[in-house]
Amino acid sequence: MPKYLFLLLALGSLASGCGSARSGAADSFPFNLRGEDTRFRISMDTDQSPSTTRPTRELGDAELCYIVAGDGSIECFTFGSLLILGPGDGIALVEDNPMLDLRAADNNSKNTAALRTLGVVALIGASVERLPEALADYIQDPGDNAAVAIALAEQLVAHNQVDLPGYGRGGRFNVAVELTHSGRKRLREALRARPGQSTVPALLRINTSYPTHADFSLSRSDALLYHWRRINR
């Protein structure tokens, strides 16, 4: 079995809680990815003891994993992801997961599992790639948690690499993030131009007023934050 498939299965266990990670698989073949604003590596934590891998909170039914980002977090669901900066204050990073309903044409369960895991990796990757833009927009038009966004942006700008620990149902992983020239420039400009008072952007900020879970008029962004709020009651 190719080394990359061992990593797929290991990451898949994080999302599903099924099986166990093969020791050293991610260390020998980490996912090294690059976007416009970020370069990053997704790898399994080599220490998979219960004391280090257990999530710090319970994951919701639709939640795949979460990544600790300073005093905030990136919450990954089956249908998208959010950057959470504070209670009821979330920014949609990814609002769709095109691979969610895809299956292997040959009905092979292992192939389907690998395909789903690729979807999880793509979701994590797209969320990390959109982090600088989301932070820059929030800083320039802040809500109640501007200090959290500013601290995370300053951390990313000040260091060549920032390690963000992630937790799934089957263990812990790590996302090592580096800003590209574009991402660093975006955040530096946002930090320099940040306003002195808070306003709430109409398009970026998610509506935090929810009638009921049965209200199907909720947008995907609203639904993402709704699920997050249910988990963190």
Image (tube, rainbow, N blue to C red):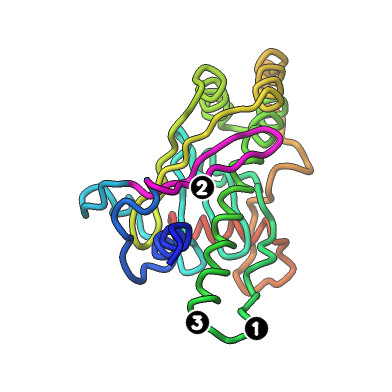
Q: Give the farthest residue toward the top.
A: 192
Asked if the stretch drawn in magenta spans residue 93, the answer is no
Mark 1, secondary structure of its residue: loop
Q: Which mark is residue 31?
A: 2
Q: Disc 3 and disc 2: Cα gap in Å? A: 23 Å
Indicate whether 194 appears above or below 19: above
Using a 10 Å C-alpha cutoff, classify the residue at mark 3 as few (fewer than 14 neighbours), some (14 to 19) or many (20 or more).
Answer: few
Using the rendered image of the protein, determine whether residue 101 is visible from the camera's viewpoint: yes
Indicate whether 32 appears above or below 109: above
From the image, which quarter does the N terminus lie in? Answer: bottom left
Which residue is at 49% across, 27% downward? 161
Residue type marked 3: Ser
Residue type marked 1: Ala
Q: Give the farthest residue toward the front.
A: 1
Residue type marked 2: Phe
Proximity of marks 3 and 1: CB atoms separated by less than 8 Å: no
Magenta stretch, overall SS: strand
Closer to the camera in the image, 178 or 128: 178
Residue position marked by numbered label 3 in the rendering: 109
Q: Give the farthest residue toward the right.
A: 203
How many numbered markers are drawn?
A: 3
Magenta region: which residues? 28-45
Q: Quadrant of residue 25?
A: bottom left
Left or right position of 156 against 45: right
Mark 2 or mark 1, earlier in chain: 2
Residue position marked by numbered label 1 in the rendering: 105
Q: Quadrant of residue 146?
A: top right
